[in-house]
Amino acid sequence: MTHKSGNDERIQWSLIARTQCVACEGEIAEPGWIVIQRRTNDNLDFNRGWKEYENGFGNISGSFFIGLKKLHNLTSMMPHELYIHLESLSGEIRYANYNHFEIGNGSTNYKLISLGLYNGTAGDAFNDALYNEFMVNWNIYFFGDSTNLNTGWWISYDQSGIGSNLNAAHSHWQPWPTSFRSVQMMIRPNLKSVPSKYKLKKTGLEALPKSCPESISVDGIYEIEVPNIGPLPVYCESSWTLIQRKCCDLSFDRKWNEYKAGFGSISDEFFIGLENLHQMTSSQPYELFIQLRDHSENVRFAQYDHFLIGNETEGYELKSLGRYSGTIGDILRNSRNRKFSTSDNNKSWFSTEGGWWLDSWNSGNLNGKRTKIWVEDLRNYFVVKASKMWIRPKVNPSN
């Protein structure tokens, strides 16, 4: 195989939504929306510095801001629509809906790249901010005034004034009142507006494919149909479906329900989820490919020709691996017939710092905090810096 280099049960609606610790909404709008900002009457101060806006602040059960990093990760994966719910001090409710909301990364100062088409009853006040960078200290920039200086927003200022700033001490949305009783901003994937490079073409097909097809010419995020689950966005590399990527800062020390549902960003670090793995690998035979990289950028791999995961009642047992081939060693063999373990649902006698099918030596735990594997031909340990795991359908598996 050739590769190119380079919390909660609330988050159930898709793998993308499972990427962050966020609240999901089904009351103000229809179900499936992720709340990215909420301001209520709990007096949380939104007068914050750059780092706080970048990383997020507040409590998702009350007032909070999700953070620019997370917002970029979510909206850059595939198009999202934005829904803004506004309630005035008198109790009047209006909304604004944009069908393609996306912000850039940190190198662009999280520029507002896209909004798409507007509809709603609140007015198109956000459109003035399109293509603007996110700013704190904007009062000093425009007015030389330090009042309210750190209420971050994509600020646009012209002769008519600032069109919108829902993070300001007196949040506003022209031409509506200068203050609101409550504000809530929500996003969800808008599959209807997904560019063709992000989704599988259905020409000649009556249904989505159940795995990444060999016919795709560009690696990236595509939609497949997982048996008994439904449409699921996945990262395809040729006919291989990426199921795990671990390299950097994302913690893989997660609870059972997070491993069941999946977590992380499929365009970055993530785990696809045990239920998805079970439904896929039990629907037809799959093979597994593992790539490991150490701190000197040396690469080793392992491949198994019949990978099968049991259901939740069976503890997502690793039921089959088939034949091994590779350069790292048969690292999963001792995990065969083991149930999956997490810190809050340990099916073994051994401690875990990342969910896995644990054996007596905790070897081959690619979700652990520090993974090292004894390699015979090196006569030394291979200390894993980064790991990736893929699966694809197998025509003639061994047992």
Image: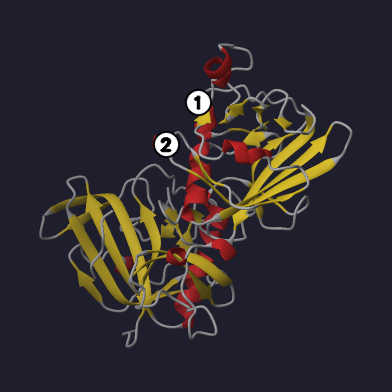
Secondary structure at badge 2 equals helix
Local packing at callout 1 (Cα closer than 10 Å; few below 14, some 14-19, many 20+) is some
Question: In this figure, which residue is indicated by the disc labeled 2?
Answer: 108
In the depicted view, which residue is nearer to us: 171 or 208? 171
Find residue 332 and report its horizontal and vertical position in percent. 31, 66
Q: Earlier in the sequence, mark 1 or mark 2?
A: 1
Asked if residue 343 can be seen in this view, the reply is no
Question: In this figure, which residue is indicated by the disc labeled 1?
Answer: 50
Which amino acid does the dot numbered 1 rest on? Trp
Which amino acid does the dot numbered 2 rest on? Thr
With 253 as the anchor, is 238 left or right in this view? left
Residue 352, disc: none
In the depicted view, which residue is nearer to us: 103 or 291? 103
In the depicted view, which residue is nearer to us: 253 or 284? 284
- Residue at left 41%, top 72%? 337
Find residue 211 and report its horizontal and vertical position in percent. 44, 76
The answer to whether the residues at label 1 and label 2 have Cβ atoms under 8 Å apart is: no
Relative vertical location of residue 100 with respect to residue 108 in this rendering, above or below:
below
Local packing at callout 2 (Cα closer than 10 Å; few below 14, some 14-19, many 20+) is few
Query: For residue 128, which quarter of the picture?
Result: top right
The Cα atoms of the two marked residues, 1 and 2, are separated by: 14 Å
Find residue 104 and report its horizontal and vertical position in percent. 46, 42
Q: Quadrant of the C terminus?
A: bottom left
- Residue at left 58%, top 39%? 66
With 34 as the anchor, is 107 left or right in this view? left
Asked if residue 193 can be seen in this view, the reply is yes
- Residue at left 62%, top 21%? 47
